[in-house]
């Protein structure tokens, strides 16, 4: 880690303000990025990090303030103009032409020509791509179609694209949310290389371990305002959390005060998936237990949950729930058998974002909302929603608020509330805290522990090891589609889990 | 989160933004009201009772079908088979309810093991059943073969038209039984001024009420909106997506059957062009009424307003003496503008 307090200023954001109807999204926020440093930008969801970056890239027009790039005032009107001036961004949600090849994506909008002819030179495109990949040690065939690659590799392509513009300033917006540990190391090598070349890096992330490792300076925002800018070396995790949420959070995890009882609720044996490489998985889940599932991206964690829930097809395997053989051939059947599933991609498969909190909450329990005959009772629907809002501590102005206007944490609580209404016995959670800010994460943990205390059983997949160690009783480790081992969360270490995760990978 | 502030403390800029949003939300209605004012200034007879009743009557004839298609649009789909399904069911209603003993009756009196005079409800139910069958096939193909409704209904529309032509030989079926026409569908219920209100206005009102209940008060209706908003999330939440899609298209088909039954009586005959392009008017009306192609968004009240405004435009054109040929141009432009505004509404508010 370096602290170049005297390195030349590359990018200077000065007193940026941005007003939306009824909301002051940014209130005189300043941030200075020096050449050859990594500057972390932190804050809870809704703190204004993305708005600030959108003002930089001209996606929003700033109301007040100045932005200087190498001393020259700039006002970009589009992301393209920013790129041409050496300011690039690697987005968290990838916007890529999925049906096109890797190199098509990298050179999109600026394809190399055959001399002066209006034809694209595939040869040069390939050579240029190879050059960038070699420099970054990315091992991807430039002719691969994007949609056939895992998200982590697509993320690498996005990073390569930003580098290929020879950018002076590169913004990384939560780049590691879909990367495995090895890939994160790779990304950090790339970031250090860019830094040593004199680039200024803005690094947005929720993961504090990463921030403390990679960054030189940290700027923290809260409620659209600048809170602090400090050298990373002077910060601790608790200090960052305190600055971000504006109050003391002494523990990242609530106390694990429940103990599973001895009796198994679910016994899985010889589970093979039909279309994924999940094979021969057997385990037991006890009543009131929080069972973690660790493993690398692509190790079959998500597939395991999907196979249990019937949203993916099984080839073979036996499920026994409290002594009774069950089949779970479809989500409907699984729900009837007392299962519930919180999916990994909340936006894509979890919520109906243009519908209201009420509709999202009651969609799984409409059968119980009947009034006269087959007709639904508005009163029952409203009261169930009310219960859910209260029990899950959902912060929403009204029941009729559209889900898209809630924060990620509140959206997730709505999903939990939806399932709580169906009174399941077994919760399957896939990355339940992904894209959720620190304060809301704590609340989600509380909800999970609360469910276990009430005697429900939880199977929870997570990429965040501290989270698994923090709230699970027992952890299964997946590797290459197989069960590599099982550890007791109280007596294991991250190293032991990592070793198991690499067993069949 | 940044707190919302109250309206009295808003800056001028924010107030304008709110006014802007209001205008955007109601843009189509505002444009059409402006058009009404213009037509009224040019042709004072436009807003007389007779023409208003006429517009309402036409609205009633097209509303159920538009509500059916709206379901398909809420599922992010569409239904191109509507017009031809109306044509086919109108034909079926007409041949079964042609006057007995008329020269050149399509079904000779002893052709079928059926009584010559069929009860009206039986024919209405048969028309709705045939329409429902068409819809069920559409829905089945959409959900089982994962095809876009545009393709499926483009295909079924051709099949239906082919069936109709083979069965009818493109013959016009007229001389319909008075029990069916002037004594039932087009019977004058009461008079407003000198203009009669026909009974099918009442029938359509009943159909509309039933659809409102289905959309808002049944699990099926809630599921329809959920599937339209996010099919995968609905599936994971335990919604029977296959059944929901099939039922939405079936409900649409039933409204086509109803419309076919009413149209044959209203027009007094079934012809090869009956129903032609009805689906396009209905889709346009849905879009004007705020049923979004984004999926999951739409209200019965919106569709009513949409169909009504569409009829206002059409009769306004007639009042202005604009030829049928040019009416097509105006309709086309209205659809474009309505869709563009609809997109702005949902995209700009990110």
Image (cartoon, coloured by chain):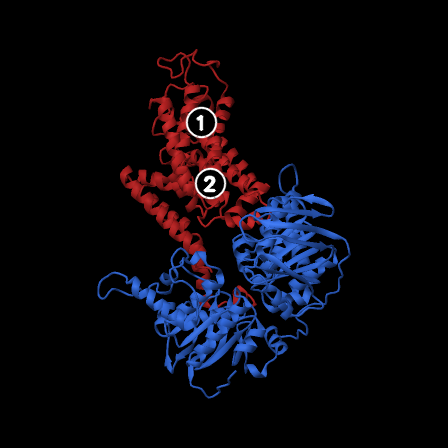
Chain colours: A blue, B red
Q: Which mark is residue B42?
A: none
Residue A52 visible from this viewpoint = yes
Q: Is residue A385 visible?
A: no
Q: Which element carries disc 1, helix, strand or loop?
A: helix
Q: Measured from the top left, where is residue B98 in percent x and y?
A: 41, 18
Q: Secondary structure at mark 2?
A: loop
Q: Quadrant where the C terminus of chain A lies?
A: bottom right
Find the residue positioned furthest to the right.
A262
| Chain letter behind tag 2 | B
Alpha-carbon neighbours of circle 1 within 10 Å: few (<14), some, or many (≥20)? many
| Extreme residue toward the left, this view | A116
The residue depicted at 45 percent of the width and 50 percent of the height is B294
Instruction: Give percent across and percent down for residue A146.
Output: 42, 58
Q: Counting other residues with Cα less than 10 Å from the Cα at mark 2, is it few (<14), some (14-19), or many (20 or more)?
A: few
Mark 1 or mark 2: which comes first in sequence? 2
Q: Which residue is mark 1?
A: B261
Q: The disc numbered 1 marks a residue on which chain?
A: B
Residue with the mark numbered 2: B145
Q: What x and y, as percent, mark residue A59?
A: 41, 67
Q: Residue at x 22, y 65 (%)?
A: A116
Q: Are marks 1 and 2 on the same chain?
A: yes
């Amino acid at each position: 880690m370096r602290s170049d307090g005297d390195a030349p200023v590359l990018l200077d954001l000065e007193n940026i303000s941005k007003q939306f109807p009824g909301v002051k999204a940014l209130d005189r926020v300043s941030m200075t990025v020096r050449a050859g440093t990594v500057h972390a930008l932190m804050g809870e969801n809704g703190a204004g990090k993305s708005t600030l970056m959108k003002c930089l890239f001209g996606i929003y027009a700033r109301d007040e303030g100045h932005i200087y790039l190498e001393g020259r005032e700039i006002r970009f009107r589009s992301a393209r103009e920013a790129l041409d001036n050496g300011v690039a961004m690697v987005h968290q949600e990838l916007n890529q032409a999925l049906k096109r090849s890797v190199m098509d994506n990298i050179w999109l909008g600026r394809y190399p020509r055959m001399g002066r002819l209006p034809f694209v030179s595939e040869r040069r495109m390939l050579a240029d791509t190879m050059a960038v990949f070699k420099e970054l040690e990315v091992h991807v065939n430039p002719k691969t179609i994007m949609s056939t690659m895992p998200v982590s590799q697509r993320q690498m392509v996005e990073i390569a694209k930003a580098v290929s513009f020879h950018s002076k300033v590169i913004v990384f917006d939560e780049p590691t949310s879909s990367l495995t540990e090895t890939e994160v190391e790779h990304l950090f090598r790339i970031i250090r290389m860019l830094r040593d070349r004199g680039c200024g890096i803005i690094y947005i992330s929720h993961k504090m371990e990463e921030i403390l490792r990679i960054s030189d300076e940290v700027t923290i925002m809260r409620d659209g305002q600048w809170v602090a800018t400090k050298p990373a070396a002077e910060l601790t995790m608790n200090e960052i959390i305190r600055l971000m949420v504006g109050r003391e959070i002494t523990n990242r995890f609530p106390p694990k005060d429940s103990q599973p009882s001895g009796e198994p609720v679910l016994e899985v044996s010889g589970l093979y998936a039909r279309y994924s490489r999940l094979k021969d998985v057997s385990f037991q889940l006890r009543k009131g237990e929080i069972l973690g599932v660790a493993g690398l991206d692509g190790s079959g964690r998500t597939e395991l949950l999907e196979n249990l829930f019937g949203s993916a097809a099984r080839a073979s395997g036996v499920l026994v729930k409290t002594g009774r053989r069950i089949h779970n051939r479809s989500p409907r059947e699984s729900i009837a058998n007392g299962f519930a599933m919180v999916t990994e991609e909340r936006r894509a498969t979890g919520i109906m974002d243009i519908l209201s909190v009420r509709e999202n909450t009651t969609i799984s329990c409409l059968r119980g909302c009947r009034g006269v005959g087959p007709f639904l009772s508005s009163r029952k629907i409203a009261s169930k929603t009310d219960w859910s809002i209260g029990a899950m501590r959902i912060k929403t102005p009204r029941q009729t608020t559209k889900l898209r206007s809630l924060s990620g944490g509140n959206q997730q609580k709505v999903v939990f509330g939806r399932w709580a209404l169906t009174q399941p016995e077994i919760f399957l959670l896939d990355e339940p805290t992904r894209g959720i800010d620190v304060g809301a994460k704590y609340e989600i943990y509380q909800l999970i522990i609360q469910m276990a205390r009430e005697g429900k059983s939880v199977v929870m997949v997570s990429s965040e090891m501290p989270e698994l160690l923090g709230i699970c009783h027992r952890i299964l480790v997946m590797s290459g589609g197989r069960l590599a081992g099982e550890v007791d969360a109280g007596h294991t270490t991250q190293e032991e889990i990592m070793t198991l995760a690499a067993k069949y990978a | 989160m940044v707190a919302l502030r109250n309206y009295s403390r808003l800056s001028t800029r924010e107030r304008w933004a709110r006014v802007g949003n209001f205008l955007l939300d109601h843009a189509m209605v505002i444009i059409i009201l402006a058009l009404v004012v213009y037509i009224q200034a040019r042709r004072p007879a436009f807003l007389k009772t007779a023409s208003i009743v006429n517009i309402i009557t036409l609205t009633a004839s097209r509303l159920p079908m538009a509500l059916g298609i709206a379901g398909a649009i809420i599922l992010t789909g569409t239904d191109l088979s509507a017009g031809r399904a109306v044509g086919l069911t109108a034909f079926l209603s007409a041949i079964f309810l042609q006057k007995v003993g008329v020269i050149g009756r399509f079904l000779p009196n002893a052709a079928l093991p059926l009584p010559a005079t069929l009860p009206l409800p039986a024919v209405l139910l048969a028309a709705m059943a045939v329409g429902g069958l068409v819809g069920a096939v559409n829905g089945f193909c959409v959900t089982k073969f994962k095809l876009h409704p545009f393709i499926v209904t483009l295909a079924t529309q051709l099949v239906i038209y082919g069936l109709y032509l083979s069965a009818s030989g493109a013959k016009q079926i007229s001389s319909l039984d008075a029990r069916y026409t002037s004594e039932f569908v087009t019977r004058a219920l009461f008079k407003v001024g000198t203009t009669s209100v026909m009974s099918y206005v009442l029938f359509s009102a009943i159909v509309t009420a039933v659809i409102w209940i289905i959309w808002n008060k049944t699990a099926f209706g809630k599921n329809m909106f959920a599937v339209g908003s996010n099919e995968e999330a609905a599936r994971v939440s335990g919604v029977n997506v296959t059944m929901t899609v099939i039922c939405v298209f079936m409900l649409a088909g039933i409204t086509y059957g109803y419309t076919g039954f009413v149209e044959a009586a209203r027009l007094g005959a079934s012809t090869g062009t009956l129903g032609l392009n009805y689906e396009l008017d209905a889709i346009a009306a849905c879009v004007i009424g705020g049923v979004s192609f984004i999926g999951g968004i739409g209200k019965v009240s919106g569709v009513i307003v949409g169909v009504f405004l569409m009829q206002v435009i059409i009769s306004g054109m007639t009042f202005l003496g604009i030829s049928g040929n040019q009416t097509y141009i105006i309709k086309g432009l209205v659809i474009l503008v309505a869709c563009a505004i609809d997109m702005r509404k949902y995209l700009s508010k990110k």
